[in-house]
Amino acid sequence: MDDRKEQWQAAERLALALTEGGLQRMAARTLAVFLFTDQETVTMGEIADQLGVSVGSVSGALKSLLSVGLLERLPAPGSRREHYRMRDDAWATLFSTQNTLTQTMLHAAETGIKTTAPQDPAHRRLTQMRDFYQFMLGEIPTLLHRWQQQQLG
Amino acid sequence: MDDRKEQWQAAERLALALTEGGLQRMAARTLAVFLFTDQETVTMGEIADQLGVSVGSVSGALKSLLSVGLLERLPAPGSRREHYRMRDDAWATLFSTQNTLTQTMLHAAETGIKTTAPQDPAHRRLTQMRDFYQFMLGEIPTLLHRWQQQQLG
DNA sequence: GCGAACTTTCGGAAATTTCTGAACACTAAT
DNA sequence: ATTAGTGTTCAGAAATTTCCGAAAGTTCGC
């Protein structure tokens, strides 16, 4: 079978899923290259070749992936090209970005609660919302901690 | 103070957060109306008025919100208008949609693993990815169950 | 059945996002 | 200092998403 072709398809499918998860399209495709490459590290030019896009697009994608901590830039001894690779805790990091979203939701609920009278139906609904996100905000760190424990064992 | 205006602002901010969480823009704004209204139920026309948009836009938004189970259509005795309201488990439902995303990621990882040799770096990376999402897939139902338990108490 | 009230659908316009290509900036070796 | 290789930025093009408005569809009461 043609493993290369299958890999390419699997990588593009993965990129689509990552996009639904909130990453921008080019960032998602770039991350997929990192996952499926058989090299330990890759350079910007290699990514652009692999995806068939301009280096400008890749530059922007790398910038955003670095800023959220999914990738790291490696010391590049004796080479003019920058080398990048996925960080070990990339998946946990990706998941953690939901934390900030949860906080935003929580804050929005609390703001709304302040503007409503206790007997108002909106007050009840917003309180339910606040309680849920407060619960989640407390649980997510526990979850990640449990994952890290399992990783060690 | 002008609570009405504050509420409107809080509602629009909430809608923005919901958008980042994956909802489409109009669906997010519509859901915000449901949260902040002082009525138990609302109709399509009321939503369109409140948001200052066309009923056509609201129709599409309601359709998507109904399909993912965030809203429910109520029996409308003696009225020609359809009445809608948020479902009690709306937040848990919204959170659960991540489950399907997690499954997609898991499946993508497994597909990739099949096309790589065990000693390949890609094999190691994809295995890490699979393990993480497998862990999450197992934990999320537990989390929601714990939330429901806490709701009862 | 017929008309009125309401809802859904859909083509196209508007707005937004995404990508490119080229100019500019930086680095390293000569 | 110059040059070649590489990285970044940004204005505009292309693609996609989002929204409106009008026409068609549905349901209810008469």
Image (tube, coloured by chain):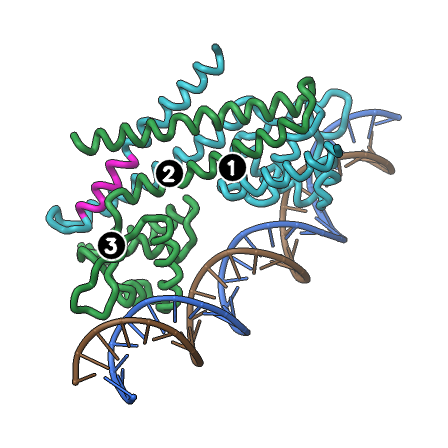
Chain colours: A green, B cyan, C brown, D blue
Task: Residue at 44%, 20% (x, y): give it.
Answer: B147
- The picture places residue B1, in percent across and down from the top left corner, at 75, 32
Residue at mark 3: chain: A
Q: Is residue B105 above or below residue C22?
A: above
Task: Residue at 66%, 39% (x, y): give it.
Answer: B9
Residue at mark 1: chain: A
Among the two numbered marks 3 and 1 on one chain, the one whose residue lies closer to the N terminus: 3
Instruction: Indicate yes or no whether the magenta region holds residue B126.
Output: yes
Region of the chain picked out in magenta, as a range:
B123-133
Q: Residues within 10 Å of mark 1 (few under 14, many from 20)?
A: some
Q: CA distance from mark 2 to mark 3?
A: 19 Å
Q: Is residue A92 left or right of residue B66?
A: left
Q: CA distance from mark 3 to mark 1?
A: 31 Å
Task: Classify residue A58 by image quadrant.
Answer: bottom left
Residue that carries the numbered disc 1 in the rendered image: A104
Q: Amino acid at mark 3?
A: Arg
Which mark, by number, is residue A85? Answer: 3
Residue at mark 2: chain: A
- The picture places residue B145, in percent across and down from the top left corner, at 40, 19
Q: Nearer the viewer, mark 3 or mark 1?
A: 1
Q: Is residue B63 left or right of residue A143?
A: right
Which mark, by number, is residue A96? Answer: 2
